[in-house]
Amino acid sequence: MDPVLAVLLVLLMLVGLIGVVVPVMPGLLVIWLISAGTTLWMGADVVGWAVTLLLTAMFAAGTAASIWLPARRGRRGGAPTGSLAAAVVGAVVGFFVIPVAGVLAGGFLGFVLAEFRRLGDWQAATRSLAGVVAAYGVGVLIELILGVAMIGTWIIAVLLR
């Protein structure tokens, strides 16, 4: 692979890492599309497919962690599916009202309002939110680690081909 192209692709994947931490774009998806796509572009042989399968497994694990952990923590804390759905609706609305930060702010606001409606107590609602936010942070950390691992795997695959 041309070294200039390789550096450009790494820079784009690093932008994807920023998207993991700051929900401006689906960062892990960006990393996966670039890494898996160029791996197969370099050669759709057994090695190319094996590396792509590994990259896909890391992408799936990171995506699942960022979705499953907060939902699991919320349910374990007693939050019904309706509160989690309110968080999703709030995140979507927040994305359009306040681009970038609105996703998190809207999601958190939607969740805490639904929990307040259910519990009738702001302190209990914010405690429930704190558990979900902590689990979300762990999910983002897992996504970030897997994003770095995906970039490293891709670099090794490029260097060995």
Image (cartoon, helix red, strand yellow):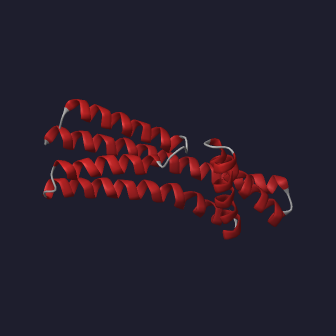
Q: Position of residue 137 (x, y in %)?
A: 57, 47
Q: How many marks?
A: 0
Q: Is residue 28 left or right of residue 135?
A: left
The quarter holding residue 154 reads top left
Q: In this view, does 118 lie to the left or right of 82?
A: right
Q: Where is residue 23 in the image (x, y as percent from the top left)?
A: 55, 45
Pick whichever, 104 or 65, lies toward us. 104
| Residue at screen point 48% across, 56% down | 65
Pick whichever, 80 or 92, lies toward us. 92
The quarter holding residue 115 reads bottom right
| Residue at screen point 78% across, 57% down | 113
Q: Where is residue 30 in the image (x, y as percent from the top left)?
A: 40, 47
Pick whichever, 67 or 16, lies toward us. 16
| Residue at screen point 32% across, 41% down | 151
Q: Is residue 16 left or right of residue 69?
A: left
Q: Is residue 64 above or below residue 138?
A: below
In the displayed orientation, state which residue is furthest to the bottom.
81
In the displayed orientation, state which residue is furthest to the front.
96
On-image quarter of the C terminus: top left
On-image quarter of the N terminus: top left
Q: Position of residue 153 (x, y in %)?
A: 27, 44
